[in-house]
Amino acid sequence: MSTLRTVHEVGTSITVLDGDVELLRYTYVPDSPQLESPKPFVHPIRTRGGHLVSLFRPHDHVWHKGIAWSLPVVGDENFWGGPTYVHGQFYVQLENDGTQAHRRVETLAVDERGVEFVHRLAWISQAGERLFTERRALHVGILDDDAWALTFETSMKNVTDRTIPIGSPTTRGRENAGYGGLFWRGPRSFTGGRVVTADGVGTADEARGRRHEWMAFEGRHDDVDASSLVVMVDHHRNPQHPPQWFARSAEFACLNPAPFFSEELEVAPGETAHFRYGVGIVDGSADVAAEIADAVRAELLSERVTDVRMARVAAGIGAPA
């Protein structure tokens, strides 16, 4: 039987608890200022042992918020937050910080397999134009005594009459800065941590821009003699799989499977773009990264069906359960 339970602050957030440990809070109606491109986010995020593995609104990048689906280049709009990269001018603060606006909750369910939350959103530019409608699903499940998994899935429909390119600062001219997508920002104490891939343990600088199915980040905590591991896995049907990755360690801790790193994805009018990811949160170190990646992959390929997944099946990009 699952040990998970939820607390729903209706119209604001959902919290998932494992016994007395708050594993995560998903704020789906944030109070962020427009400059930070208001969007839902997952923070705090904790291991089953209660160790914090996320950071909220750091002073260096106030638009970084735990784990969030953040896109810096959506046509001429910015759904990342802060300034926009303009080739030849570097970063310029423009009036283009859009909002991912919650519209309604479709599902909140708890069973022996975990917690499921599905909601609808609208992507609205700072000027007030609706660009996408979105259906988003999150699932939380226990993997083992030391690990749990978050599955994140989104389907974004272009509701304009024009093709919208989704890209990154690299597709607009900045070298090796292809961030955008599902982005995790780690605690300050994780700075200088180790990055793990199927090829072994290395540095974020070595991993940035490389293609991998999964990537993990091992960091150490202050105050306690413990390490934690965050493992992100890309679904095999995602665009550009296996993706290039955006990762940092020396400056701060972050991981981001980046499907728009070096090539824009064009979404035609009426077309829907689909993405699915798994994230493992672990009380442990780099030596269990591959094992956890396998477990998270199994979650991604499970027969658990959500409305979002059925949309993928209807579009011909997912196998029916």
Image (tube, helix red, strand yellow):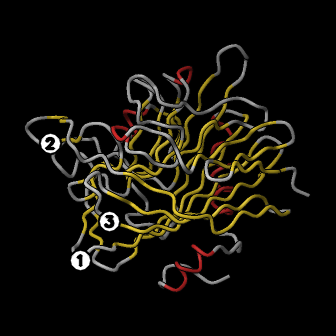
What quarter of the picture does the C terminus occupy? bottom right
* Residue at disc 3, secondary structure: strand
Which SS class for mark 2? strand
Q: Is residue 49 above or below residue 220?
A: below
Label 2: few (<14), some or many (≥20) within 10 Å?
some
Disc 3 residue type (three-letter): Leu
The quarter of the picture where the N terminus appears is bottom right
The spot of residue 294 in percent (x, y) is 66, 56
Residue at 10%, 35% in the rendered image: 89
Residue beneath disc 3: 131
Residue 291 in view of the camera: no
Would residue 5 appear left or right of 156 to someone viewing this image?
right
Residue type pointed to by label 1? Asp
Q: Which mark is residue 161?
A: 1
Check disc 3: other Cα within 10 Å, few if <14, some if 14-19, many if 20+: many
Q: CA distance from mark 2 to mark 3?
A: 21 Å
Q: Quadrant of residue 106?
A: bottom right
Mark in front: 1 vs 2: 1
Residue drawn at (7%, 38%), measured in percent from left and top? 88
Q: Which mark is residue 106?
A: none
Q: Give 286 or 2, whichever is nearer the viewer.
A: 2
Mark number, residue 86: 2
Cα separation between marks 1 and 2: 25 Å
Q: Are marks 3 and 1 in contact (CB under 8 Å)?
A: no
Q: Amino acid at mark 2?
A: Val
Residue 270 in the image, given as x and y percentages of width and height: 33, 80
Instruction: Name above or below for residue 123 compared with residue 39.
Output: below
